[in-house]
Image (cartoon, rainbow, N blue to C red):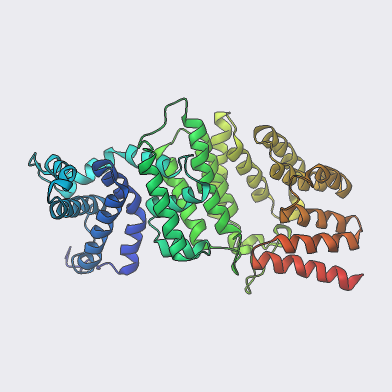
């Protein structure tokens, strides 16, 4: 009671929110202490199980991170005590003596203060999850598991694989970290840019899978978009001086701002020119623009900053016809120099068509047909340009090819609808 008013007790959703926010922080601390990812995860999960039992009755403590870390550490020590029996457990017994032999008092406030002082632990865990020795699939799974706190079942459902398959993928990734002795450290100044690119790519991949699911009957997986933005913001708090981190946060916010307008009530795709822009999230657009301005002021543009700037131009336009396409082409020219990939060139070709016409766009797409032959968006872009050029039959064929290569049900349905409309017309 405070001033005569009862403090509301937390419900399951409030506790789950704390779990999602604090899981990676707690695992990173326990991993540093015990040097074992499985032991760290088990201890943190034990602590949250205790929280789920006590907090609905006692309330969330003032320093929940410190409470979780302290409880997890005690639970891990209890497990060590149970396991450290016999000569084969000598290493565990030695670790137990190191952890308990100094007689230090453990308070939640002290643990929380320590957690606040070791942001480096979270950063180490980020770089561990995204180490280039791991496969891209393993990096994504570990990042969602250890930093996002998603369960194995949640990750498996997200990527439409059996839970057992995802559990094996995560287990193999942990074993790789252990057996290859991947160091739990922040890369050196010389290695940081290359390693950071891997981290940013993982977060962007998580977002991309959420914004345009590669398979399944949902075009948008909101939970993944939200998680990716949370992870990007976490990176910004850990690396506030890295322009590309700022650029990634801005990019995700500006793209995600259009999420509500991207599908109709039946879940069907609405392309960008046809979206109701009044449904775009104005707060996210404003924040994204502010971050883009911060990036521009620093004068060291990178791929994520340039992509964010392109999305900011789209966000500036009150209608599709008001889009400043010449500025977008200029930004894509810079992006192509910074990241000379066929996908960037394909997106630039779309902008070129808006400035110089469909024939110029088709000419820009032509050299990309071989390197992107199996990419459905190449055929979708080419179909749209052929349609604008009046080459209806060719456009219908390209829509059919694009649909055959597309894994997501909503996008496939959109492409087939376009093909069917052209077939009926011809």
Number of numbered tags placed on the structure image = 0
Report if residue 324 is visible in the image.
no
Residue 291 versus residue 392 in the image, above or below: above
Q: Quadrant location of the C terminus?
A: bottom right
* Percent x, y of residue 268: 66, 69
> Which residue corresponds to the image point at 69% horizontal and 42% vertical from the top-left?
344
Left or right: 141 with respect to 269?
Answer: left
* Percent x, y of residue 325: 76, 45
Residue 97 versus residue 78 in the image, above or below: above
> Which residue corresponds to the image point at 60% horizontal and 52% vertical from the top-left?
255
Foreground residue, 338 or 61? 338
Q: Quadrant location of the N terminus?
A: bottom left
> Which residue corresponds to the image point at 58% horizontal and 28% vertical from the top-left?
299
Report if residue 297 is visible in the image.
yes
* Percent x, y of residue 213: 59, 60
Residue 227 versus residue 308 in the image, above or below: below
* Percent x, y of residue 80: 17, 51
Left or right: 337 with respect to 239?
Answer: right
Foreground residue, 86 or 25? 86
Residue at the extreme top of the image, as rendered: 190
């Amino acid at each position: 009671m405070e001033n005569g008013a009862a403090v509301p007790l937390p419900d399951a959703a409030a506790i789950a929110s704390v779990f999602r926010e604090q899981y990676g922080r707690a695992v990173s601390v326990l991993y540093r202490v015990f040097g074992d990812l499985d032991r760290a995860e088990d201890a943190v999960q034990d602590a949250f199980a205790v929280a789920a039992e006590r907090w609905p009755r006692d309330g969330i403590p003032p320093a929940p991170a410190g409470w979780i870390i302290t409880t997890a550490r005690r639970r891990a020590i209890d497990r060590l005590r149970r396991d450290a029996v016999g000569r084969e457990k000598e290493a565990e017994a030695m670790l137990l003596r190191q952890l308990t032999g100094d007689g230090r008092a453990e308070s939640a406030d002290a643990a929380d203060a320590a957690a606040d002082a070791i942001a480096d632990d979270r950063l180490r865990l980020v770089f561990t999850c995204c180490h280039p020795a791991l496969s891209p699939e393993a990096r994504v799974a570990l990042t969602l598991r250890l930093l996002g706190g998603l369960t194995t079942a949640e990750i498996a459902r997200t990527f439409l694989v059996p839970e057992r398959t995802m559990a094996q993928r995560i287990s193999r990734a942990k074993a790789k970290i252990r057996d290859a002795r991947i160091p739990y450290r922040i890369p050196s100044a010389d290695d940081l840019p290359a390693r950071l690119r891997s981290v940013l790519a993982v977060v962007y991949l998580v977002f991309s899978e959420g914004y345009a699911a590669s398979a399944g009957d949902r075009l948008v997986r909101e939970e993944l978009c939200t998680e990716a933005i949370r992870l990007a913001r976490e990176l910004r708090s850990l690396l506030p001086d890295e322009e590309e981190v700022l650029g990634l946060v801005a990019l995700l916010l500006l793209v995600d701002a259009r999420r509500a307008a991207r599908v109709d009530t039946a879940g069907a795709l609405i392309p960008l020119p046809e979206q109701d822009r009044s449904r775009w999230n104005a707060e996210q657009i404003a924040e994204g623009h502010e971050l883009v301005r911060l990036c521009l002021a620093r004068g060291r543009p990178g791929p994520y900053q340039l992509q964010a700037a392109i999305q900011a131009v789209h966000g500036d336009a009150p209608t599709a016809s008001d889009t400043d396409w010449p500025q977008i082409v200029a930004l894509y020219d810079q992006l192509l120099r910074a990241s000379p990939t066929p996908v960037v060139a394909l997106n630039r070709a779309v902008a070129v068509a808006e400035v110089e016409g469909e024939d110029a766009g088709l000419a820009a797409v032509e050299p990309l047909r071989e390197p992107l032959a199996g990419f459905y968006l190449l055929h979708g872009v080419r179909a749209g340009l052929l349609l604008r050029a009046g080459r209806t039959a060719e456009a219908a064929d390209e829509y059919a090819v694009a649909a055959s290569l597309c894994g997501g049900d909503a996008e496939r349905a959109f492409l087939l609808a376009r093909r069917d409309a052209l077939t009926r017309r011809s």
